[in-house]
């Protein structure tokens, strides 16, 4: 850090306007409440398709990274593009014929001996930290592993004591693209009366739809309209019809 303070006056003159990165803190349900480096991410601030400046919107209605020009959207967990032209394979002005999944370029983060967050210089590799303006490519196996960690982190961060299980891949080729408490889901048409505690979207690698499958986990508590009744053996009770 001492070297940073000594050299910081020279940094603006050496900076490339296309190399801006943004440091974000994850939403609480993605581990953002933790007091360690896992609560932070650093992504390129340049959209991989339109090359506009993207912004992180950490408010209750959005909780994601958005390109204001073409409405490309990226999840804060790993920078994966899940909505917009970039999610269909458009990057750097070209349509990519690849089975890889696109994401924002990233900087790996660490903590120095004084407790300051430090960022490591990107490797400028498509299958590594990514290339600014082109994106970062994640293989299906890398995305599956990232989704598994996402599911586990949300389970640990959930205020609901009930355990839940979601597969990182719903069907062969259908990967998880969005996971959140139901009130953060980007499709507001499914609210289950406000009872769903987990909301997930899955899409096939080759799909051009916003999503192919939606999964909602509804807690079966005594207060729920979908509560379990045991009067004459376990069954689902729909109070709305009773």
Image: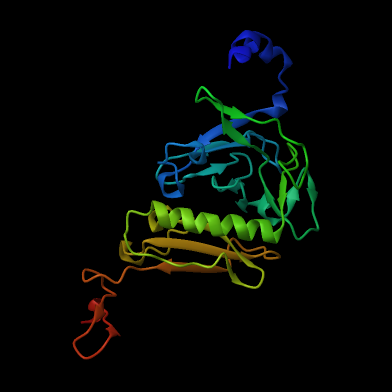
In front of the other: 115 or 183? 115
- Residue 48: percent from left, percent from top: 70, 42
Residue 205 x, y percent position in the rendering? 69, 64
Q: Is residue 62 left or right of residue 220?
A: right
Residue 226 visible to the viewer: yes
Task: State the image coordinates of residue 75 (x, y, percent, origin top left).
Answer: 55, 48
The answer to whether one can see residue 83 in this image is no
Q: Is residue 20 above or below residue 12?
A: below
- Of all residues, the one furthest to the left in this rendering is 231
Q: Quadrant of the C terminus?
A: bottom left
Rendering quarter of residue 50: top right
- Taking 150 as reference, is 67 left or right? right
- Measuring from the top left, give residue 39's x and y in whole percent: 48, 40
Residue in the picture at 45% in, 67% down: 165
- The image shows residue 197, relative to residue 49, as above or below, that is below
Name the residue: 51% across, 41% down. Answer: 38
Is 63 on the left-hand or right-hand side of 146?
left
The quadrant the N terminus occupies is top right
Residue drawn at (70%, 30%) of the image: 121
Which residue is farthest front?
113
- How was this image coloured? rainbow
Residue drawn at the location 55% of the way across and 32% of the way down: 23
Total residue callouts: 0
Q: Nearer the viewer, residue 159 or 75?
A: 159
């Amino acid at each position: 850090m001492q070297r940073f303070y000594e050299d910081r006056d020279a940094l603006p003159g050496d900076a490339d306007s296309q190399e801006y990165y943004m440091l974000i803190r994850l939403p609480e349900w993605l581990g953002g409440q933790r007091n360690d480096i896992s609560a932070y991410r650093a992504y390129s601030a340049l959209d991989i398709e339109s090359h506009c400046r993207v912004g992180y919107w950490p408010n209750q209605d959005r909780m994601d990274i958005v390109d204001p020009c073409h409405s490309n959207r990226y999840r804060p967990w790993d920078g994966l593009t899940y909505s917009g032209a970039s999610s269909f394979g458009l990057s750097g002005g070209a349509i990519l014929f690849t089975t890889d999944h696109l994401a924002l370029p990233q900087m790996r983060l660490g903590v120095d001996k004084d407790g300051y967050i430090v960022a490591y210089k990107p490797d400028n590799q498509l299958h590594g930290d990514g290339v600014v303006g082109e994106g970062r490519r994640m293989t299906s196996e890398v995305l599956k592993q990232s989704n598994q960690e996402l599911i586990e982190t949300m389970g640990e961060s959930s205020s609901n004591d009930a355990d839940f299980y979601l597969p990182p891949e719903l069907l062969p080729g259908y990967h998880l693209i969005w996971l959140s408490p139901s009130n953060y889901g980007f499709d507001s048409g499914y609210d289950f009366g406000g009872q769903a505690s987990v909301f997930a979207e899955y899409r096939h690698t080759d799909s051009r739809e916003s999503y192919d499958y939606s999964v909602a986990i509804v807690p079966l508590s005594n207060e729920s309209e979908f509560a379990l009744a045991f009067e004459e053996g376990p069954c689902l009770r729909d109070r709305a019809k009773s």
